[in-house]
Image (cartoon, helix red, strand yellow):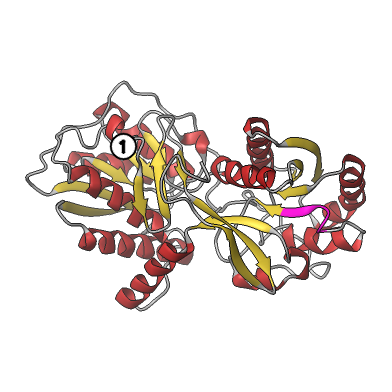
Amino acid sequence: MFALFRTPRKPLTRPLTRIAALVSAFWVAACDPIATGSTGPSINTRAPVPVALLVPGGSGNAGDELIARSLRQAAQLAVSDLQGAQIDLRIYDTGPSAAGAGAAATKAVDEGAKIILGPVYAEAANAAGVAVAGRGVNVLSFSNNPDIAGGNVFVLGPTFQNTANRLVSYAASQGRGRIMVVHDRNPSGEAGRRAIESAIGNSRGASLAGTGSYDFSQEGVVAAVPNIVATARGTGAQAMFFTADTAGALPLLAQLLPEAGLDRETTRFIGLTRWDIPAATLALPGVQGGWFALPDPSLNQQFQSRYQSAFGEAPHPIAGLAYDGIAAIGALVKSGKSDALTTAALTQGSGFVGVSGIFRLRSDGTNERGLAVGQVRNNQVYVIDPAPRSFGGAGF
């Protein structure tokens, strides 16, 4: 799961800051998605197809400006890589508000855009979708919040459910099917818990061993540790699945649980979020041996290197989503069909290949991504189960 880079908090030396979105920087509240009977616009593939890219530029926030630049550059790189498809990429700043995103989406369609790529934040993506729902234009947002998915809005960001499905299935295949869920008592923690429990319920060989939770504060984590350890021991949990991320409670949990007597070999730690961002997290003693999911490392590294070479800086963690969006649109436009950007075309079962591996859009607006399973050993990540290269194979 993507999150903004932050320096890991040192366990027991600094209180955990309360934030609205612990697990993902892009998990924010949103209105209900707007259902639409439209399936998408008709396009002329003999001419460049207008594609709008909505980025959080113009907000005055340095972090948002960095994201905007990185998304723009990644999209431009993708356009330059296209063969057999012409894309007229048009970039619109959304400013700091959801209303600005809605206005940018309306302007883009007024000016001829046939599909919208972005925005980033869930509220902004929802507003963009609402603004153009009646005009038959689909929105491929960079959000990972499934609450906004549906109708004409798709989410490109890796979802909790997709990650949970991958890791629960792998754990069951390795004889670690009795899984305990440990989550934050906040909206994103509850959403993560639901995703993991759903994955357990749908996976052969997996069962819910128990749950543990904590208030999102240093005191809350410390107070919860004895009960979490007792539940794991009492239920014979073979794995413990955390919703916490590296900027939140993960470092504290990873330290305190083993100190309280929980054997990490008996009960394998599993993370719903990326444990390699920032890389300093890999040096934490408590995460050694733990599992988490990550995009196809070889493809992702190629993108990182090409982006660095082209622009002289590293891409933001979500920049690859902009590349993936253009790659998918380009692949569809290349077909030469006038209905290439309809909902039916976007949700083709074979999916697409992006810089992070294979992915496909689902009819409910969510997505499936081919993920690798990594293990932390000796402060490094080792891929212990590679990302699938096609749908229907291992990992799906």
The amino acid pointed to by label 1 is Leu
Q: Does the magenta stretch include residue 268?
A: yes
Q: Is residue 56 left or right of residue 21?
A: left
Graded by Cα atoms within 10 Å as few (under 14), some (14 to 19) or many (20 or more), the crowding at tag 1 reads many
| Picture residue at 33% right of the left edge, 62% below the top | 74
Q: Bounds of the magenta span? A: 264-269
Residue 76 image position (x, y, % from top left): 26, 62
Along the viewing direction, whichever of 8 and 263 lies nearer the viewer: 263
- Residue furthest to the top: 37
Badge 1 element? helix
Q: Main secondary structure of the magenta part?
A: loop
Q: Is residue 139 above or below residue 68?
A: above
- What x and y, as percent, mark residue 138? 30, 36
For residue 127, what is the image quadrant? top left
Whether residue 6 is visible to the viewer of this picture, yes or no, is no
Q: Can residue 359 be seen in this view?
A: yes
Residue, x 61% and y 68% (percent of image)?
381
Residue nearer the viewer, 6 or 328: 328
The residue drawn where x is 41% and y is 68% is 315
Was residue 104 drawn as part of the magenta stretch in this picture?
Answer: no
Q: Give the labeled residue for mark 1.
A: 346
